[in-house]
Image (tube, rainbow, N blue to C red):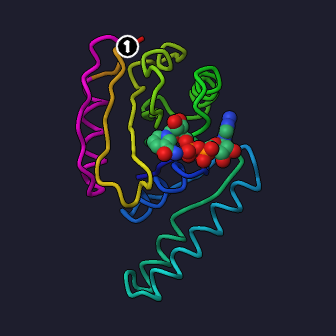
Amino acid sequence: MTIGIIGSGAMGSGIAQVAAENGCVVYVNDNREEALQTASGRLKALMKKLVAKDKRTQEQADNILENVHYTSKAEDLEHCDLVIEAIVESLEVKKEVFRWLEKIVSEDCILATNTSSLSISAIAAACHKPERVIGIHFFNPAPLMPLVEIIPALQTAAQVIEKSKALIDSWGKVTVIVKILLDL
Ligand SMILES: NC(=O)c1ccc[n+]([C@@H]2O[C@H](COP(=O)([O-])OP(=O)(O)OC[C@H]3O[C@@H](n4cnc5c(N)ncnc54)[C@H](O)[C@@H]3O)[C@@H](O)[C@H]2O)c1
């Protein structure tokens, strides 16, 4: 499975690690080259520490590092099965990024946001295919926090909810589906 992550800050980096630890190939995108370099350096340092503490074997650490690709090139996201956006908490910026993403990824790719407070339905409404948009809300730090909220937009297709839940469950997380009664 190929996962795209937009934003290599606290959340994006942590989610990328979780996905890579579970055998996914991950492309982490950021519009700041220095953020990508920082995230890459941080993951390398963390893996070194975990190996030193016998919490990962050298082989596991090498596999994780090989699985995560840091890129500022949009086209690297084109083969993703799921893209999780974890950028600045701004509805306008997220809408713009989702519109941009839709032009890059395949028709079947699920588009998720890690937003803590914005309307998933409003983000979905900006998209050509709103039924593939969903909230997948990890807590900080993502590698350590077991709970992940699956937050459908009003427009999200049932199959997208099921697929998202099954994938995050397979990463060893505890998922809850959050029912939105009124999404403003
Ligand atoms: N930090 C938390 O405790 C926490 C917990 C749960 C959810 N969230 C949510 O996760 C999201 C990210 O939060 P964070 O704390 O990781 O933020 P952050 O500031 O640490 O990282 C955001 C990253 O996104 C990049 N970015 C900004 N605009 C971009 C764009 N257009 N394209 C590509 N990259 C872009 C920035 O360069 C930065 O590296 C937010 O929506 C936030 O509400 C945060």
175 falls in the magenta region = yes
Side of 183 relative to 162 (left or right): right
Look at the numbered disc 1 and give the secondary structure of its residue. Answer: loop
Which residue lies at the image location 23% right of the left edge and 38% below the top edge? Answer: 176
Residue 36 located left or right of residue 1: right
Percent across and percent down for residue 6 are 58, 42
Between 109 and 176, the one nearer to me in the picture: 176
> Would residue 156 be counted in the magenta stretch?
no
Is residue 135 shown left or right of residue 105?
left
Which residue is outermost to the right? 33
- The quadrant of the image that shows the C terminus is top left
Instruction: Tell me if residue 99 can be seen.
Output: yes
Whether residue 83 can be seen here = no
Task: Depth check: give the residue in front, 167 or 7.
Answer: 7
Residue 24 is drawn in which quadrant?
bottom left
Residue 98 figure quarter: top right
Q: Residue at x 52, y 16 (%)?
A: 128
Query: Can you say whether 83 is above or below 182 in the image?
Result: below
Q: Amino acid at mark 1?
A: Asp
| 183, above or below 117, in the image | above
* Place of residue 183 in the rendered image (x, y in percent of width and height, measured from the top left): 37, 13
Residue 105 placed where, x, y %? 55, 35
Residue at the disc numbered 1: 183
Bounds of the magenta span?
A: 158-183
Q: Residue drawn 31% across and 30% down?
A: 160
The residue drawn where x is 30% and y is 56% is 171
